[in-house]
Amino acid sequence: MSTEVLLTETFDHSAITTLRHAVASRAADAGLVGDRLEDFVVAVNELLTNAVRHGGGLGRVALWSADDAVVCEVSDTGAGLPEAVPEKAVRPAATQPGGWGLWLAEELTDTFQLITGDGGTTVRVSSRVSLRES
């Protein structure tokens, strides 16, 4: 398994825009293109925003390429999610102004893992660089 670290950084709200651009650039350099790249960047942006908004104001992001995928992990040290997380995120009501972040992140990426507890929340998403037929 070949792994290359593309980015690792602690962030707050003032760094989200810069990080979004860095994620886009580095994910593109690692081979994500077109709609898959755009979807991945939207998903990561939602995770960055959630970490700041709901996770105590600070977060940590790590981005790497592994084999045929780009992987991003966003962590915070907040109080964790207040209720049990469903196995698959439920789509919010169309009229709901918030609560779309985790659902979007799961919908827009190939893999989605969430771990939450009293010490914070970590979400890992990945998107395959190529979609070869099996």
Image: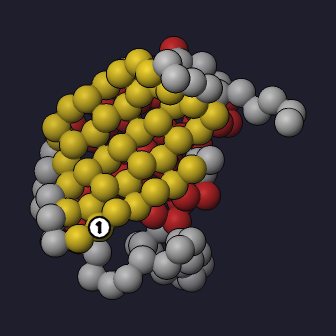
Between residue 25 and residue 116, name the one nearer to us. 116
Display colour scheme: secondary structure
Q: Which residue is at 25% across, 29% downward?
A: 8
Q: Quadrant of residue 134?
A: top right
In-image side of 110 versus 73 (left or right): right
Q: Residue furthest right?
A: 133
Residue 76 appears anywhere in the view:
yes
Residue drawn at x 46%, y 57% is: 113
Measured as percent of width and height from the top left, residue 119 is found at: 15, 65
- Quarter of the rendering containing residue 84: bottom left
Total tally of numbered discs in the picture: 1
Q: Is residue 53 visible?
A: no
Q: Secondary structure at mark 1?
A: strand
- Tell me the crowding category of disc 1: few under 14, some 14 to 19, or many 20 or more residues within 10 angstroms, Cα based: many
Residue type (three-letter) at the residue carrying disc 1? Thr
Is residue 130 shown left or right of residue 117? right
Picture layout, residue 34 above or below residue 45? above
Question: Where in the figure is residue 20, as x and y percent of width and height?
Answer: 37, 35
**Foreground: 99 or 96?**
99
Picture coordinates of residue 92, whole percent (x, y): 54, 78
Q: Residue at x 27, y 82 (%)?
A: 82
Instruction: Name the residue tied to disc 1.
Output: 116
Going 57% across and 30% down the picture, which residue do you hit?
Answer: 69
Foreground residue among 77 and 36: 77
Please state if 16 lies on the left or on the right of 91 as rendered: left
